[in-house]
Amino acid sequence: MDRMNRMKELGFNLKPILLLILLLAFGACSGKKEKPAAKPPVMVTVADAVEKSIPVQIRAIGNVEAYNTVSVKAQINGQVARVHFAEGDDVARGALLFTIDPRPFEASLRQAEASLARDRAQARFAREQTERYGALLKDGIVTQDQYDQLRANADALDAAIAADRATVDNARILLGYCYIRSPIDGRTGNLAVKAGNLVKANDLPVLVTINQIAPIYATFTIPEKDLVKIKKYLGAGKLKVDAVIPDDPKGPESGTITFLDNAVDTATGTIRLKGTFANTGRRLWPGQFVNVVLTLTTRPNAVVVPTRAIQTGQQGEFVFVVRSDLTVESRAVATGEMLNGETVIARGIAPGEKVVTDGQMQLVPGARVTPKAEQPPGQVPRQ
């Protein structure tokens, strides 16, 4: 009261002030609360769930192997007289690769042939002499012992002729080894010897290695859980396999499965397969790594959506489906194979329904959206 009396003495009028305070309090109590502004629709990208045939595939990393590999060695001792190819050349089967100096072996062959001619002449004389002594034996002019001696001599010369023939054949074989030819069609590798080098039979290093690269293999492994499917479809016919070369715009090389190993590797739980490729364009190279795509079969009438539409929550996988009133619902789905950015929906989505592929982080069930069609791959959006 003393303070109020003091304010009056100073000339303050309290009634207008109190009235203003009461009016403000009454207005605050009696005024209606304003409704919060509605959230604007969320801009999202959508795509249609479509029905189409989808290949059932298994993917793995493969390693390219030569169809045939031959390490060429000398089979005789001698000096390399000539090399008939350049390293890295393609060679045909039977093409001459090396010539080892043939002169010592030609001389050995001539010597063996001369020995054969000599023994033939002696054997001819021995047979004629045996025939003459056979007639004299009947007349009692010579003894049986003399006749037997001549006959044994003729038989020994016949055996010598057989040995001489073997010697001639061996000399011809050794002379043939002077001319080393390619046993396969293939591509030569590093050349280990040059003309003038001395080589030894079956010695190291090998003269050259030839790889057959057309056709060619791609080897890869798959988990043993897929073995039942592989055996099922392999028994029904040939399985197609594609080798995708990284960073190669020409697309994959196509081939067929030609080998299934006879045992599972117990250390890794995998089994090895080989695909054979024609490789006419020489795009696959021994030692190269490729992405292998094995096609088992084709699933008709499969419902697929872009893989980006699949979300994972606490209850499992789900997608946001756009309803006719432009609101979204969260729908649980069961997914299958993935291929080229698309995922098979085994259960939960019908063909023709629209699913959200971009903008899911801003959505909750029931949210309103403004859908925008997804651009096909490679198409430039309109400005």
Image (tube, rainbow, N blue to C red):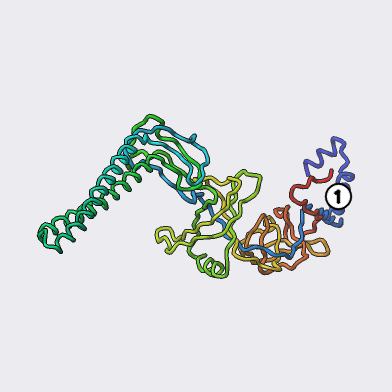
In terms of depth relative to the viewer, which is nearer, 209 or 378?
Answer: 209
The secondary structure type at the circle numbered 1 is helix
Q: Is residue 40 left or right of residue 339?
A: right
Question: Which quarter of the image is occupied by the C terminus?
Answer: top right
Residue 231 at least partly seen: yes
Identify whether 72 is placed above or below 47: above
Relative image position of residue 274 (x, y in whole percent) = 50, 57
Q: Quadrant of residue 301?
A: bottom right
Relative image position of residue 256 (x, y in whole percent) = 57, 59
Residue matched to label 1: 24
In terms of depth relative to the viewer, which is nearer, 156 or 3?
Answer: 156
In terms of depth relative to the viewer, which is nearer, 105 or 109?
Answer: 109
Relative image position of residue 261 (x, y in whole percent) = 45, 61
Identify whether 328 is placed above or below 78: below
| Amino acid on which the number 1 mark rests in the picture | Leu
Q: Residue at x 62, y 63 (%)?
A: 56
Q: Is residue 250 left or right of residue 99?
A: right
Residue 39 at least partly seen: no
Relative image position of residue 264 (x, y in whole percent) = 43, 63
Q: For the view shown, which residue lies furthest in the top direction? A: 196
Q: Quadrant of residue 268?
A: bottom left
Question: Which quarter of the image is occupied by the N terminus?
Answer: top right
Tally of marks? 1
Q: Residue at x 58, y 49 (%)?
A: 279
In terms of depth relative to the viewer, which is nearer, 207 or 264?
Answer: 207
- Please rate how many residues cluster around mark 1, counting C-alpha atoms within 10 Å: few if below 14, some from 14 to 19, many from 20: few
